[in-house]
Image (tube, coloured by chain):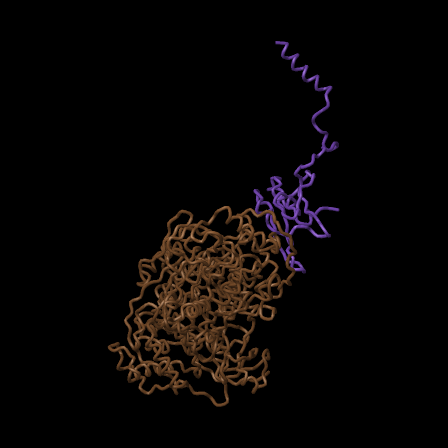
């Protein structure tokens, strides 16, 4: 009767001397591993988003959270006049990154995506553009 | 039949079939890039190489090799796959891999084949082309860097459209698909080249970057412009019609469309669409709810029920059969007025009076398929190409492929005139009836008339004094046409009708029918008279009885009634009398005078702007139903997108009104079609589901009779030019003005003058001219050419500004003076 209790306490006490597995978030930050799929970012090259609005990401997206609208710029080139991701629907599968033929989108290490209103979860092109 | 074996399968095909056709017949797919079933075999791409047992040692192109008895064909061996891969590698050597930004991606033959044959590397290295891309053209974007030199665009433009805008220029590696002097594209803009381009070298500019092909919802429907009834596939996304998609297996025309069918769809999602009902309050049209608007209409119509003669209604033949039937039932049945009409009254007369008198049916005795089955086509007015361009393509094909003789009697020349072997007889304007009477007389005089036709004696008496001189043409020409027509095995008369052609009325239909009946060219395949209704459902409007049957007023009388106060309430469903009925000033005055006018339309047209209540209606893309095209084909129209704004279909509007006024109520438009099938004899046995994709041609029982047609003597006024109205190739009715495509190419009203007249008036192309008649004066842009003969001016009727009905008054020919502004 007493033995199991002692056994249990033994485990409890032994943990008091081990390194804790939990993280004291937010004072402590996790070490994000490579390949982590966090918030998306649109890659920039020559001061322009690399995205050519080919619509492959909205096509492949299983959650249907990406909205793209193509536009024609002054050089008659195709660009994304609108690029929006609805983070509430996104399942962070990374298919968009995999589908992109021009390496225009990647997933960052940013995982803190909480917000106050639904509208704030719509990430527009401006918010997604990689920050220098 | 020829028997052969393809991949172990036995197949029997016609002796003029190629290996490709034979493989297709037994369900084996041979890859192609340069072949199109509508075009002559070309054999340029070498993708369709196959192995033939009897011709071992080399690979044989399947698309150009005719079948022979006992042929043993292999379509996929290792050697063939290797050869096809090589073809693709060589094509990809020059073809840019810009699929992410190319609108053809997803619908690109080269892309699909590259994927299918797993060409993921290239053994060769070369620079890509660096041709200049034509961004200037508002409809067709040409990026010759992507071109794979299949030549389909040049061939379709030459063989079917008969325009010849493209050809290969330069040689060897520098060869490219070029235009006249390598300049900008200046053609009819039918977009046939875009439709057949296997890659993205030719793109539809209005659709550029709008959506990817795979994201489009594809809806098979029927074009809502002219009466040809071309089937088209609407590509829509997010409630917007974004493009028309080419489907080579659609309709008699194999997916071939004209400029307005292919590029004129933007009116559906135009910003100018009405999205809410408008009611006139304190002299101004203001937005209202449907309940308010319909309550007002119901009250007026209910009050008018006690005096049905004071109510009149005009409908556009663009509505579906179901809507028109309900329209007739509401006004004729529930309200009890016979004052209903469509198409200005005169534009359907050729069917409702002409064909009825001559053939005993209010429909054209011939159908579209007869065009290609005929031996001789007699086309009334070269404008048949402009009014019904896809019938024009059929004529082109018939003349060029099958050697059909083409005779044109017209008041001006046109594109048909230039077809090989075509003979055009240019007569003085307004002399069509006199010309047909002269032809009849010549047939009788030459002893070519069929004996024992009903009404022969009456006709003989009536045409006794008809001469070629009265028609303004030479006696030899008349005798030659009469002889050719009578002695042809199968001869067909093609008569376009419409609001632009007041002269193409019942009398002309009788006169033309007389010639066909007199020479025995009726009641057989490929012969007779093809009356081509102007609008998508002109034939349907006639079948549904949208014209006064008893003592009711016709369209012209309704306008007069509005002016003199006899008509107090006018219901207009989609018509735009202010622009399309003769004598604009008179119509405007009449519509101002009428106590209460309701207009249901897609746009705030010139007519709708004068209404007391405007109801927003929907376009053909937002509703289902049926259209009946010329040649009596009933076809399904299918809803592609939800209604824009608060707009409702005319079916919903009429159904609500009908119920409110104590009439019939239907749960859906399908129920109306069931009732049509039960009550309109010609539609007996038809069901919407039974029409499927191809539609059905309803049969007619003809009782041909000769009906004397009295020719009016044209009275040319000295020193004046003869103004003839009609349709422009890029427009149809007044609706195409709201499509961007047609407006890019033909934005303004114009008057076409002969070079000699223009020189005498010191007018040059593009000048503003004032055209004055006894009715009024209008300012339009001058166009100068050799198409119209000296002394004749041509002007299309579609435009709101500079509308030609300001100066016409319903006469066949209006005598005008033209002066530079």
Camera-side residue of B587 and B738: B738
Across the whole image, how many numbered discs are drawn on residues? Answer: 0
Coordinates of residue B707 in the picture (x, y in percent)? 30, 78
Coordinates of residue B202 in the picture (x, y in percent)? 57, 61
Q: Quadrant of residue B316?
A: bottom left
A4 sits left or right of B291 in the view? right
Camera-side residue of B52 and B491: B52
B350 sits left or right of A114 in the view? left
Coordinates of residue B681 in the picture (x, y in percent)? 30, 63
Q: Residue at x 39, y 63 (%)?
A: B628
Vertical placement of B220 versus A112: above or below?
below
**Residue ranking furthest to the bottom:** B718
Q: For the C terminus of chain B, which image quadrant?
A: bottom right
Q: Quadrant of residue B535?
A: bottom left
- Is any atom of residue B593 visible in this view? no
Vertical placement of B582 versus B203: above or below?
below
Chain A tint in image: purple
A63 sits left or right of B68 in the view? right
**Residue ranking furthest to the left:** B452
Q: For the N terminus of chain B, which image quadrant?
A: bottom left
Chain B tint in image: brown
Coordinates of residue B483 in the picture (x, y in percent)? 34, 79
């Amino acid at each position: 009767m007493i033995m199991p209790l002692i056994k249990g306490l033994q485990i409890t006490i032994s943990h008091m001397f081990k390194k804790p597995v939990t993280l004291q978030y937010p004072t402590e930050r996790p070490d994000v591993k490579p390949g982590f799929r966090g918030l998306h970012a649109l890659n920039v090259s020559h001061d322009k988003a690399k995205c050519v609005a080919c619509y492959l990401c909205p096509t492949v997206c299983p959650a249907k959270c990406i909205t793209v609208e193509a536009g024609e710029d002054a050089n008659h080139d195709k660009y994304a006049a609108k690029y929006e991701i609805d983070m509430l629907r996104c399942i962070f599968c990374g298919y968009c990154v995999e589908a992109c033929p021009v390496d225009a989108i990647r997933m960052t290490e940013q995982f803190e995506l909480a917000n106050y209103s639904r509208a704030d979860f719509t990430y527009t092109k401006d918010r997604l553009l990689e920050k220098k | 039949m020829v028997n052969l074996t393809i991949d172990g399968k036995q197949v029997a095909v016609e002796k003029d079939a190629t290996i490709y056709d034979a493989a297709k017949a037994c369900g084996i797919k041979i890859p192609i890039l340069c072949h199109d079933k509508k075009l002559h075999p070309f054999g340029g791409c070498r993708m369709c190489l196959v192995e033939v047992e009897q011709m071992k040692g080399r690979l044989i192109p399947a698309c150009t090799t005719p079948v022979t008895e006992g042929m043993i064909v292999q379509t996929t061996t290792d050697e063939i796959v290797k050869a096809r891969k090589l073809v693709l590698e060589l094509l990809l050597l020059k073809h840019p891999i810009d699929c992410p930004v190319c609108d053809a991606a997803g619908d690109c033959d080269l892309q699909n084949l590259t994927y299918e044959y797993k060409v993921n590397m290239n053994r060769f290295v070369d620079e890509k082309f660096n041709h200049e891309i034509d961004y200037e053209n508002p409809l067709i974007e040409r990026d010759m860097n992507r071109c794979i030199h299949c030549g389909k665009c040049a061939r379709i433009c030459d063989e079917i459209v008969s325009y010849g805008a493209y050809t290969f220029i330069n040689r060897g590696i520098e060869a490219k698909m070029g235009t006249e002097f390598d300049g900008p594209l200046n053609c009819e803009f039918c977009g046939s080249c875009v439709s057949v381009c296997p890659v993205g070298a030719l793109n539809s500019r209005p659709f550029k970057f709008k959506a990817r092909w795979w994201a489009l919802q594809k809806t098979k429907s029927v074009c809502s412009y002219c009466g040809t009834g071309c089937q088209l596939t609407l590509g829509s996304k997010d409630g917007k019609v974004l493009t028309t998609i080419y489907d080579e297996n659609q309709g008699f025309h194999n997916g071939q469309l004209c400029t307005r069918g292919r590029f004129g769809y933007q009116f559906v999602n135009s910003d100018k669409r009405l999205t809410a009902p408008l009611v006139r309050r304190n002299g101004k049209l203001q937005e209202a709810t449907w309940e308010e608007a319909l309550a007002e209409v119901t009250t007026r119509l209910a009050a008018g029920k006690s005096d049905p003669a004071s109510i009149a209604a005009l409908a556009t033949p663009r509505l579906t059969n179901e809507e028109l039937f309900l329209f007739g039932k509401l006004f004729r049945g529930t309200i009890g007025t016979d004052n209903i009409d469509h198409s200005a009254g005169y534009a359907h007369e050729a069917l409702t009076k002409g064909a009825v008198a001559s053939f005993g049916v209010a429909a054209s005795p011939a159908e579209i398929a007869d065009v290609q089955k005929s031996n001789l086509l007699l086309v009334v007015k070269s404008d048949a190409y402009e009014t019904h361009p896809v019938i024009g393509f059929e004529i082109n094909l018939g003349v060029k492929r099958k050697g059909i003789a083409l005779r044109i009697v017209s008041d001006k020349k046109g594109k048909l005139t230039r077809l090989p072997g075509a003979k055009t007889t240019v007569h003085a304007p307004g002399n069509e009836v006199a010309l047909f009477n002269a032809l009849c007389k010549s047939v009788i005089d030459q002893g070519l008339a069929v004996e024992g036709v009903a009404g022969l004696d009456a006709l003989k008496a009536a045409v006794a004094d008809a001469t070629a001189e009265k028609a303004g043409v030479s006696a030899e020409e008349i005798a030659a046409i009469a002889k050719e027509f009578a002695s042809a095995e199968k001869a067909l008369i093609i008569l376009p009708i419409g609001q632009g052609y007041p002269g193409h009325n019942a009398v002309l239909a009788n006169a033309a029918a007389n010639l066909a009946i007199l020479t025995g060219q009726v009641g057989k395949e490929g012969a007779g008279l093809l009356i081509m209704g102007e609008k998508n459902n002109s034939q349907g409007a006639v079948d549904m009885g949208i014209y006064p049957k008893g003592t009711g007023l016709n369209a012209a009388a309704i306008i007069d009634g509005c002016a003199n106060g006899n008509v107090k309430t006018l219901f207009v469903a989609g018509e735009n009398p202010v622009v399309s009925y003769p004598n604009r000033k008179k119509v405007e005055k009449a519509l101002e005078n009428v106590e209460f006018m309701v207009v249901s339309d897609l746009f705030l047209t010139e007519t709708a702007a004068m209404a007391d209540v405007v109801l927003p209606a929907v376009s053909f893309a937002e509703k289902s139903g049926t259209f009946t095209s010329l040649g009596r084909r009933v076809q399904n129209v299918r809803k592609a997108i939800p209604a824009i704004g608060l707009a409702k279909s005319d079916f919903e509007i009429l159904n609500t009104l009908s119920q409110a006024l104590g009439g019939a109520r239907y749960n859906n438009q399908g129920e109306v079609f069931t009732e049509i099938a039960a009550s309109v004899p010609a539609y007996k046995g038809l069901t919407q589901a039974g029409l499927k994709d191809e539609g059905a041609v309803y049969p007619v029982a003809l009782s041909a009779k000769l009906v004397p047609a009295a020719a009016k003597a044209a009275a040319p006024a000295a020193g004046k030019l003869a103004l003839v109205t009609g349709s422009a190739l890029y427009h149809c009715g007044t609706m195409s003005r709201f499509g961007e495509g047609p407006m890019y190419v033909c934005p303004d009203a114009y008057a076409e003058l002969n070079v000699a007249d223009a020189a005498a008036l010191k007018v040059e192309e593009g000048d503003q001219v004032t055209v004055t008649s006894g009715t009024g004066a209008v300012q339009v842009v001058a166009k100068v050419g050799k198409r119209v003969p000296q002394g004749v001016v041509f002007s299309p009727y579609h435009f709101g500004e500079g509308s030609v009905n300001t100066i016409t008054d319903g006469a066949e020919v209006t005598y005008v003076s033209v002066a530079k502004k």
